[in-house]
Structure formats: structure tokens, C-alpha cells
Amino acid sequence: MTNDNPPSDVTPPAAGTGRERVRIFDTSLRDGEQAPGFSMGRAAKLRLAHALEELGVDVLEAGFPSASDGDFEAVQAIAREVRRPIVCGLARCVPGDIDACARALAPAAKARIHLFLATSPLHREFKLGMSREQVIENAVAAVRNACRHFDDVEFSAEDAIRTEPDYLVEVFSAVIAAGARTVNVPDTVGYTTPAEMYERVRYLREHVHGIDQAVLSTHCHDDLGLAVANSLAAVAAGARQVECTIGGIGERAGNASLEEIVMALATRAELFGVDTGIDTRKLYPTARLLGQLTGQPIARNKAVVGENAFAHESGIHQHGMLKHRGTYEIMKPEDVGFSRSQLVLGKHSGRHALRERLAALGYAPDEAQLDAIFTRFKTLADRKREVFDSDLEALAVGRDPEA
Ligand code: KIV
Ligand code: ZN
């Protein structure tokens, strides 16, 4: 999975590593917020936008200004306050949306408009009622119009994955000629597979005219649980922007999860050979903040940022962890913002972990005492889901933890 021909003029090396940079485009505040249960008001959006700035995202999609007055105002407030990342607004290929975006983003230090138009046969026929030619005409006219207000124009071919590959080449070639500087390949309905995505991106890089003047981007949905794998395949094939959300929130089953992509690229840097500008230690705090703002807590078993991501309960795993943490951990918890790994004591835990925990609590039972404590610990653990330090202290001094 190597990248053999990167568009070098638009993808500078990441500072200090000599590796190419993949831009992280966060759409938690747009595609993420569109999902039932994740809607946020202006104040919440602003708070998350500041956290995303701290996290180091390159592009922050703040909303869809023509969707509602509230969204317009939220985008405008973010454009005023958030200065480091590019602040982006979504727009259909219609003049009203482009004007609304230009007004909402006027205060931004760095602004981008994100235009989208569906290109697949199904959408052309049933949603748009447009021919292939009409779709290209509309897209080109919108990009030209947007270029009057913005230096930075992104074009998304909605449902790109179900679009005829040669037609997608025509669309992207035309919008790049009209001034688009990022062309995005959304898997709008989460239909593709990693091998197919790899092939699609490779094909586009080979055939789109002017692709060296644009950044090729990907935007994957998770209907088949493949959004992250598909995004990584796109990067392996040369995509240099990934659109994603904190916790993978987004329409239906969600979007590709930012923290999973970033940590996969970092943990397997030898495979991908790219860097992101993300401060990974802020991943967990940012995911927690999202949970607080939306009232939707992170699932315990969520990769990278779930409470169980660095928790070990089984005796065999705990034993391994006590000898060398690399046995059962491929990332350091501190690197994603957790304070430490957790050896959770429960019914699967073994004597080694129990002895370690008791030692940490100041108890040093001899072998016979440990045997007795261990037997009572197992009985207790069968009744309770987790055994806490207070329970262990009671066991260590011979008290009944449940009395
Ligand atoms: O999923 C999608 O196609 C989108 C576009 C607006 C980029 O969210
Ligand atoms: Zn989407």
C-alpha cells in the first residue's frame, strides 16, 4: 500500500518528518450534527469548534449556512472566533447557497466553500432530473460563481462511488478547470469496499486532467462499518484529505471516525508514510466534550476513545500487560489523552493482577494469604461486575466487602 505518485505541489511534507501531510477535514459540526441525537446549538458548536482548533484539524466544516438561520449564525460565529484552521461552509450548486456561504464566512481568517452536486445515475435521474451534461454545466457554473467570493473552493461529487468512473473523471476535470482546488469522493451511502476505493482513487489520479493542481479527498459513510477502512484505502492510493468526524457521528450509521483514522495513520506510519497535524493527546478530551455537548456518551468499547480502549480484565491479558504493555496494547493511552491503562479487576482477572493491585494499595500478603483473598475475590467478582479498590481493601483485612 504505497503512494507512488503524490500530487506534490499541493501536499507539502509534514513539518519535521519528511513525510507527506494528509489534511484532516472535520465535519462533526456539519455531517455529524445532521444525525438524530447529535444536533447542537450555537454555543455548543462554538465550544466544539474551539476544541477542534486545539486538536489541530486542518479544515473545520462549521455547517450549512443556507440550512437555517441558526446554522448561518453558528457558521458566522465560528468564522469570527476560530482563526487557525480553514473554516468551511457547505453549499448546493445554487447561487443562493453560495451567497449565504460567502456572507457567513466573511469574517473568517481562512475560508472555504464546499460545493456539492450528485453525479450518480440514480441521483441524476430520480433526485435531480438532470442529464450528465446538465450536471457538469451546473457544477462548473457553481464553481465559477464561488471563485468570485473564495480562493479556496472544494467540490464534492455526491454519491461518487456509484458514479460511472469515466464520467466522474469528466466531472472532476471540468470543476478543476473551473477553479476547484479540492475534489472530494464521497461514499455517500457507505457502499464501497477498501479494494474498490483504492482502485477508484488510483484511477482518478491517473485520469483526471489537472489533478496535480488539486487535493484529492475522501468522505466515507459507515453503513457497512467500512468507513475508516475505506478512508485508509483512499489514503494508500494517494488521497491527501480525509473527511471525518469525532466519534464517527454522522448521517445514519455515521461518518469515518477521526480518531480511528488519525491513530491508524500514526500507529501504522510505516505502511502509509504520511502524517497528520493532529495533537493526538487531545483525542479523548475532544470525544468526551462532544459527549457532554450532545448528551450522547461515548460507547465503552469505542476504538481509541472508549473507556475500555485501554482496560484489561482477563487474567491472561493482565499478566502479559504486567510483563510488557506491548503484549496487549498497540498504542499508549497517554498518546490519545487517557492518563494510563487500567487493569480492571473482575471475574476474568488472575492472581498476578490481584497481587499487583493489592501492592499498589499497600498490602503484601504471603502466598497463603493471597490464596485466601483470591478465592474470596473470585466469589465476589462473580456477583459484581467490577471489583473496586474499596472491595479489595476489605478483602485484604478480612472484612466482608458487602457488609
Ligand atoms: O455524504 C455526502 O455525500 C456528503 C456530501 C455533502 C459531501 O456529506
Ligand atoms: Zn456525508
Image: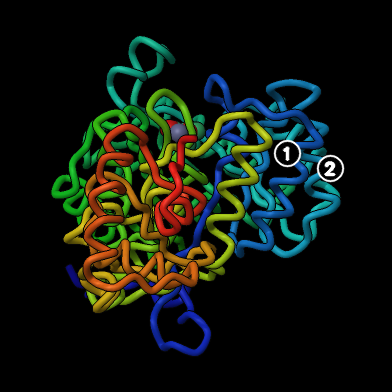
| Residue 217 in picture, x, y percent from top left | 41, 53
Count neighbours of disc 2 (C-alpha within 10 A) and say few if under 14, some if 14 to 19, many if 20 or more: many
- Residue 45 - label: 1
Count neighbours of disc 1 (C-alpha within 10 A) and say few if under 14, some if 14 to 19, many if 20 or more: many
Rendered-image quadrant of the N terminus? bottom left
Q: Secondary structure at mark 2?
A: helix
State left or right for residue 148 relative to residue 319: right
Of residues 332 and 136, the one drawn nearer to the viewer in this rendering:
332
Identify the image quadrant of residue 191.
Answer: top left
| Residue 147 in picture, x, y percent from top left | 66, 49
Identify the image quadrant of residue 136.
Answer: top left
The disc, 1 or 2, on the residue closer to the chain's N-terminal end is 1
Determine if residue 3 is in view: no
Q: Which residue is at a point 57% across and 22% down the rendered structure image? A: 37
- Residue 77 - label: 2
State left or right for residue 94 relative to residue 324: right
